[in-house]
Image (cartoon, helix red, strand yellow):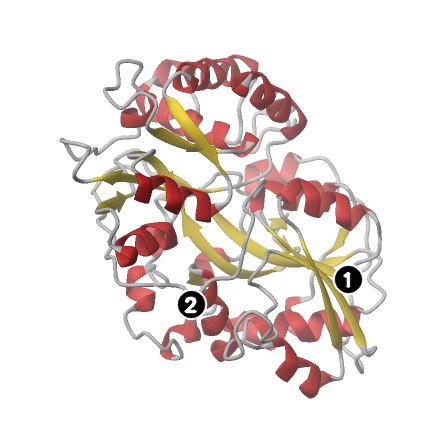
C-alpha cells in the first residue's frame, strides 16, 4: 500500500473489534477479468529449490524482517540465516511507490508487496510467478488469501500471502455522540466534526470513496472500488474533495494517528486494528473501531520474487520460513495484523490475538475489498475503459491541493 510506513512495534492487543452486520464483499476480478486481461510479461518460474546462494536482499515493510536490533526478544532473521546460510540484507520501503522503484533497480531478490503495488510489479515484468509447490508452508496458508486478484493472474500465484487486515472506521467515544455505522460519517459535508476527521494518505484511498458510492449511489454502477471508469472516478474524486474540507490530518504513519487520537486532534476516521489497540492500551482516549455497513477496504501483503533475483533459492527458503507457523505468528504479533498462515494461531503468545484480528474468519475477510492496483483493463471485466493507478495518483494530488 502506498504510504504504510512501518516502524517496528510490539503489538498491543485486547481492544475487541466491534463488527456491524451489513453488506460486504471482496475485491472482484475473477475468471472473467483474468481471461481477457492483457498478457503478463513472460518470466521464468523456478522449478526446484537448490542450495542457498549465501545472501538474500529484501525490500520490506519495517517490522517484517526483525533480527533483534529493535527488541532482542524479537528475531526471526538470525535463526533463518543459521538454518539456511542465507545472510539477509533488508531495505525498508516506506511506501508502495518506493518499493516499486526499488524493485526496478534490479538489486533485490524479493519484496513484501501490498495490493496497490503487486499488479504494477507483475505487469511491469519485475516479479516472477511463484511455484507454490516449492513452498511447503503455502499448503496451510488461509485459502481465502490464495488466487486473488492482487496476488495472481489467471490462477497463477505471483507470491506467498503473509499478513492482512481491514481499514476500519474508528471514533473517540467521548467526542462522537452517536456511534457511526456508515462511512458516511467521514464524508458528510455537514459533519459536526469538521477539522477533526482523519483519512488515509494515499491514492488508493480513492477506493474508500468508491466503496461508499458503490453502496449509496447505484446509478454509478460501481461493482469494484478498484475498477473505475472516468465517470465513476470523477464521482469519487468529487466526494473526496468535499471531504477535504473536513479533514484535519491525513496520515500514513500509524504512530501519527495514534498521537492524533490521543491528543484529541482527530476524533473520527480510517484506522487499523493495531492503532485502536494502541490508543486503548495507552488509556489517553477511548475509541471503538468497526467495519461499517458498506464493508471496508483492506490489505493483504505478499512476498514476491524478483524476476531477475540473484539469490532465488534463498528467496524461496525465506518465503517458506516467513510463513511457517511459529515465525508467521511472531511477525503478526510484532506488526499488528492477521497472520496468513492458518497454523500460526496455535503459536501466538497472546491466545486471544487471532480472535482480535479475525485471522481465521473468512466471513470477516469477505467483507473486505482488498487493495488491488487499479489498471486500465477493468478488474470487473468491462475491458480497457478504467482508470489506472497513475491517473489515481494525479487525482489524489489534486484532491489534497
- Residue 320, position as x, y percentages in the image: 62, 74
Q: Is residue 187 left or right of residue 149?
A: left
For the residue pair 344 and 278, the one nearer the viewer reads as 278
For the residue pair 138 and 242, the one nearer the viewer reads as 242
Figure check: 113 above or below 376: below
Q: Which of the two discs, 2 and 1, sits closer to the camera?
A: 2
- Residue 142, position as x, y percentages in the image: 45, 64
**Residue at position x 61%, y 67% from top?**
65
Q: Is residue 330 left or right of residue 37?
A: left
Answer with the quarter of the image where residue 322 lies: bottom right
For the residue pair 67 and 362, the one nearer the viewer reads as 67
Which label was assigned to residue 235?
none
Badge 1 is on which residue?
109
Local secondary structure at mark 2: helix
Q: Is residue 398 left or right of residue 298?
A: right
For the residue pair 282 and 60, the one nearer the viewer reads as 282
**Residue at position x 53%, y 50% from top?**
148
Q: Residues within 10 Å of mark 1 (few under 14, many from 20)?
A: many
Q: For the residues marked 2 and 1, what is the alpha-carbon distance in whole angstroms?
A: 25 Å
Q: Are marks 2 and 1 in contact (CB under 8 Å)?
A: no
- Residue 217, position as x, y percentages in the image: 34, 17
Quarter of the rendering occupied by the N terminus = top right
Figure check: 325 above or below 97: below
Quarter of the rendering occupied by the C terminus = top right
Local secondary structure at mark 1: loop
Which label was assigned to residue 333?
2
**Residue at position x 42%, y 32% from top?**
199
Look at the image and tell me whether residue 314 can be seen.
Answer: yes
**Residue at position x 31%, y 30% from top?**
183
Q: Residues within 10 Å of mark 2 (few under 14, many from 20)?
A: many
Look at the image and tell me whether residue 386 can be seen.
Answer: no
Amino acid at each position: 500500500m502506498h504510504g504504510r510506513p512501518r516502524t517496528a512495534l510490539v503489538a498491543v492487543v485486547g481492544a475487541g473489534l466491534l463488527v456491524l452486520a451489513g453488506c460486504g464483499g471482496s475485491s472482484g476480478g475473477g475468471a472473467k477479468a483474468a481471461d481477457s486481461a492483457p498478457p503478463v510479461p513472460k518470466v521464468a518460474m523456478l522449478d526446484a529449490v537448490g542450495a542457498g546462494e549465501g545472501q538474500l536482499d529484501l525490500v520490506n515493510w519495517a517490522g517484517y524482517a526483525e533480527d533483534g536490533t529493535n527488541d532482542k526478544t524479537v528475531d526471526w532473521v538470525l535463526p533463518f540465516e543459521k538454518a539456511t546460510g542465507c545472510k539477509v540484507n533488508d531495505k525498508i520501503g516506506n511506501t508502495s511507490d518506493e518499493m516499486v522503484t526499488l524493485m526496478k533497480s534490479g538489486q533485490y531478490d524479493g519484496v513484501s508487496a501490498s495490493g496497490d503495488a503487486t499488479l504494477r510489479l507483475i505487469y511491469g515484468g519485475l516479479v516472477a510467478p511463484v511455484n507454490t509447490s516449492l513452498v511447503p508452508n503455502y499448503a496451510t496458508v488461509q485459502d481465502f488469501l490464495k488466487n486473488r486478484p492482487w496476488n495472481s493472474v489467471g490462477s497463477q500465484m505471483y507470491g506467498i500471502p503473509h499478513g492482512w487486515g481491514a481499514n476500519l472506521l474508528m471514533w473517540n467515544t467521548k467526542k462522537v455522540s452517536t456511534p457511526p455505522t456508515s462511512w458516511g460519517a467521514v464524508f458528510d459535508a455537514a459533519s459536526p466534526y469538521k477539522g477533526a476527521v482523519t483519512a488515509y494518505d494515499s491514492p488508493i484511498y480513492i477506493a474508500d470513496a468508491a466503496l461508499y458510492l458503490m453502496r449509496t449511489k447505484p446509478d454509478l454502477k460501481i461493482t469494484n472500488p478498484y475498477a473505475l471508469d472516468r465517470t465513476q472516478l470523477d464521482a469519487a474524486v468529487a466526494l473526496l474533495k468535499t471531504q477535504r474540507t473536513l479533514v484535519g490530518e491525513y496520515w500514513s504513519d500509524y504512530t501519527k494517528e495514534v498521537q492524533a487520537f490521543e491528543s484529541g486532534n482527530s476524533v473520527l476516521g480510517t484506522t487499523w486494528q493495531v492503532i485502536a489497540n494502541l490508543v486503548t492500551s495507552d488509556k489517553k482516549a477511548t475509541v471503538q473501531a468497526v467495519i461499517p455497513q458498506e464493508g471496508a477496504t483492506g490489505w493483504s501483503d505478499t512476498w514476491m520474487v524478483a524476476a531477475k533475483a540473484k539469490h532465488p533459492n534463498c528467496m524461496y527458503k525465506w518465503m517458506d520460513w516467513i510463513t511457517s507457523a511459529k515465525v508467521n505468528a511472531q511477525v503478526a504479533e510484532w506488526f499488528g495484523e492477521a497472520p496468513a498462515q492458518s497454523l500460526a494461531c496455535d503459536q501466538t503468545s497472546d491466545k486471544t490475538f487471532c480472535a482480535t484480528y479475525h485471522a481465521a474468519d473468512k466471513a470477516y475477510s469477505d467483507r473486505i475489498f482488498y487493495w488491488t492496483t487499479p489498471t486500465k483493463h477493468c478488474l470487473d471485466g468491462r475491458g480497457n475503459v478504467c482508470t489506472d493507478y497513475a491517473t489515481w495518483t494525479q487525482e489524489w494530488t489534486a484532491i489534497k491541493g
